[in-house]
Amino acid sequence: MSTLNGQETYIQQQFAERIGGANYGKDTAIYKFEKIKRAKAAAKKDFPEVELIDMGVGEPDDMADAGIVAKLAEEAAKRENRGYADNGIAELKEAAAKYLHDVFGVEGIDPVAEVVHSIGSKPAIAMLPSCFINPGDITIMTVPGYPIIGTHTKYLGGEVYTVQLTEENDFLPNLDAIPEEIARKAKLLYLNYPNNPTGASATREFFAKVVDWAKKYQVVIVHDAPYAALTYDGLKPLSFLSVPGAKDVGVELHSLSKSYNMTGWRIGFVAGNPLVVKAFSDVKDNNDSGQFIAIQKAAAYGLAHPEITERIAAKYSRRHELLVSALNDLGFNAKKPKGSFFLYVEAPKGVEGGPTFATAEDFSQFLIREKLISTVPWDDAGHYVRFSVTFIADGEDEEHRVISEIKRRLGDLKFIF
């Protein structure tokens, strides 16, 4: 709250209603990730000698490939790369189109008209509603999911309709359950596969149904695909754009953050329908001046070397197997996902002779405060916790040690499900 000598200033009255208006900063509600942050700090203070095992963090634990780093250094030293990039360089667009073809089998992407870079996928998610949403329009998103997906629709005076992802439906949205009046009023449908937080993967059949549904109701599809190339056990990476008709109804957002260990580099791309790409490019041009050209060139190098992602996926696959085995030994019903670095498991209802958990958040707080194991709770559609296999561990021996330590800390508990 803006104060001067303890008195509220005029600034308090100037805030936009979209962020709370005159009450901005006065809300005492504590949000999920802030609760996790506070619980971690309290646990470290209470048990300073105990290692906190962070299984909640949603970003890679390793650095980018040495070849990508070397390419950045090389390009950063060139004078011609110093200036504004605006809506991107041709080299990255061409690399993205080839990457979609080589890794996902996507045919016919025009790098000039159907690809544009983004400063990571988060800004693309945030900006796309500005292309379509007027007051009263609807964006459909799935829950559990990335909250930012709905934020800008609300900022623009639109409404957000949520569709639950349930285990009974393989964590795919039931499009047939969306009311007719919602579907006809909707402008955007956001999807995300492999999914955060469930780890679920889509199928070609599901995407084909999405295309038909979008055409029927004239809805623009936005497929957020930052984990698309992180797949396991023989599952071939699947792009929405590889399904016939997909380019007629929407776009796909790709990011190098998760698949190339490049979170802080902030680089990705939007590909698909040329009208949507053009509209996004225009909105983007009024929001940023493009990512540093040297980073774009390093990204192009990475996209030309998908074997980098294959090595990363092999590590996550190995870690998933260790974690699934450990949790199942402890009484959980954990199943290795086919993609992403997230493992989504039902939270227990309590511990025999110990506390009960009315929500996944209760269980998550217990794990942090009592066992110094951090996870992320999701109570949007059932009660689940998300483990991430991006925990800090250098090498396989260290991976085994971390998982063994989790089993040791929880081994004296009998969970009730």
Image (cartoon, rainbow, N blue to C red):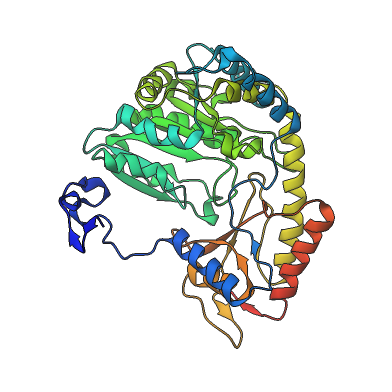
Picture layout, residue 91 above or below residue 331: above
Residue 230's x, y, as percent? 67, 39
Would residue 240 be found to the left or right of residue 14 on screen?
A: right
The residue lying at 51 percent from left, 31 percent from top is 253
238 horizontally vs 181: left or right: right
> The C terminus appears in which quarter of the rendering?
bottom right
Quadrant of res 268: top right
Side (left or right) of 246 relative to 229: left
Q: Is residue 107 visible?
A: no
Image position, residue 308 (x, y; %): 74, 32
What residue do we see at 65% from left, 26% from top? Answer: 104
Residue 346's image quarter? bottom right
Choose top left, top right, bottom left or bottom right for residue 222.
Answer: top left
Residue located 71% across and 66% down the image: 328
Instruction: Decide: is 373 above or below 73.
Output: below
Q: Is residue 129 above or below residue 377?
A: above
